[in-house]
C-alpha cells in the first residue's frame, strides 16, 4: 500500500515516507471514516483486485492465466505462487471437511438400516466419498495444476513511457491549439464591439 517504486541495485521496495515509517513500522496517513491509519484487509483487497491481479481464461484450451503486477518482479512472482497455493489449500481443506462429514452421515445411516438395497446404495456412496477424500488428501495441486510456473520478469510491463510521452505531446498540442482558438475568438469579439462603438458615435 505504501510502495511507490523498487530499487534494482538493492532489491528493496521504495516506500512513501509520508504514508509509512519503515523505521518504526507505523502508518502515518490520516484516518478516513471507519478506516484508520493502518490499511484494512478490505482496503488491501480492493487495491489488489483493481490494480494488481489479472485472471484470464483461454476459452479454447480452458487454461487460466494468472498474473500479478508489482513494482518488484520478485514480489510479483511470490504473490502468484502464494495465490495458487492458498486456493489449492483452502479447496482441499474444504473438500476434506465436507467429505468426512458425508462419510460420517452415510456410515450412521448404514448402521440404522437393515434393507439390503439401501445398504448397497450406501456402500456405493461411501465408496465414492472415500475416493474423493483420498484424492483430496493426496493431491497438493487440488484445483489448479500449474502448467507454466511463475517466473521473475526480466523487463517491466509498465508504465510504457514512450506511449505516455506521445500521448502527453498530442494532448498538450491539442490543448494549446484550443487555448489559442478561444483567445482569438474573444479578441475578435472585442474588435467587433469596438467597431460598433465607433460607427455608432459617427
Image (cartoon, rainbow, N blue to C red):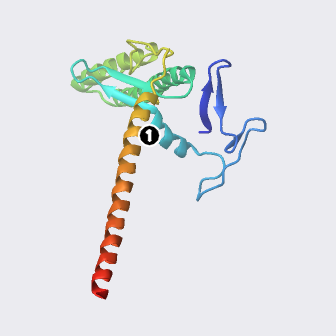
Residue 47 visible in the snapshot = yes
Q: Foreground residue, 58 or 99?
A: 58
In the displayed structure, 146 sits above or below 38; it is above
In this orientation, which residue lies closer to the viewer: 200 or 44?
A: 200
The residue under the point 56% across, 42% down is 41
- On the image, the x and y values in percent for residue 178 come to 35, 54
In this figure, which residue is indicated by the disc labeled 1?
50
Q: Nearer the viewer, residue 92 or 7?
A: 7
- At x 48%, y 28%, the residue is 69
The N terminus - image quarter: top right
Q: Position of residue 145 (x, y in %)?
A: 39, 15
Left or right: 77 as drawn, with respect to 113: right
Residue at the (32%, 17%) spot, across then down: 127
Q: Residue furthest bottom?
A: 201
Q: Position of residue 66 (x, y in %)?
A: 40, 24
**Rendered position, 100 above or below 37:** above
Looking at the image, can residue 91 be seen? no
Tag count in the figure?
Answer: 1
Q: Which residue is depicted at the point 37% across and 29% down?
A: 55
> Quick one: label 1, few (<14), some, or many (20+) residues within 10 Å?
few
87, above or below 154, in the image? below
In the rendered image, the quadrant that contains the C terminus is bottom left
Amino acid at each position: 500500500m505504501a510502495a511507490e517504486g523498487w530499487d534494482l541495485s538493492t532489491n528493496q521496495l521504495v516506500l512513501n515516507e509520508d504514508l509509512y515509517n519503515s523505521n518504526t513500522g507505523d502508518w502515518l496517513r490520516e484516518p478516513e471514516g471507519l478506516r484508520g491509519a493502518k490499511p484494512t484487509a478490505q482496503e488491501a483487497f480492493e487495491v489488489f483486485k483493481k490494480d494488481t491481479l489479472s485472471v484470464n481464461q483461454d476459452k479454447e484450451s480452458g487454461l487460466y492465466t494468472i498474473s500479478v503486477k508489482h513494482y518488484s518482479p520478485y514480489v510479483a512472482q511470490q504473490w502468484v505462487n502464494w495465490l495458487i497455493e492458498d486456493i489449492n489449500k483452502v479447496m482441499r481443506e474444504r473438500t476434506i471437511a465436507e467429505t468426512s462429514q458425508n462419510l460420517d452421515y452415510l456410515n450412521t445411516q448404514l448402521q440404522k438400516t437393515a434393507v439390503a438395497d439401501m445398504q448397497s446404495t450406501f456402500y456405493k456412496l461411501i465408496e465414492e466419498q472415500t475416493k474423493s477424500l483420498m484424492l483430496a488428501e493426496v493431491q497438493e495441486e487440488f484445483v489448479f495444476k500449474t502448467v507454466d510456473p511463475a517466473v521473475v520478469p526480466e523487463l517491466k510491463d509498465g508504465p510504457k513511457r514512450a506511449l505516455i510521452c506521445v500521448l502527453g505531446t498530442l494532448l498538450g498540442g491539442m490543448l494549446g491549439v484550443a487555448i489559442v482558438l478561444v483567445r482569438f475568438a474573444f479578441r475578435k469579439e472585442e474588435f467587433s464591439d469596438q467597431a460598433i462603438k465607433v460607427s455608432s458615435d459617427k
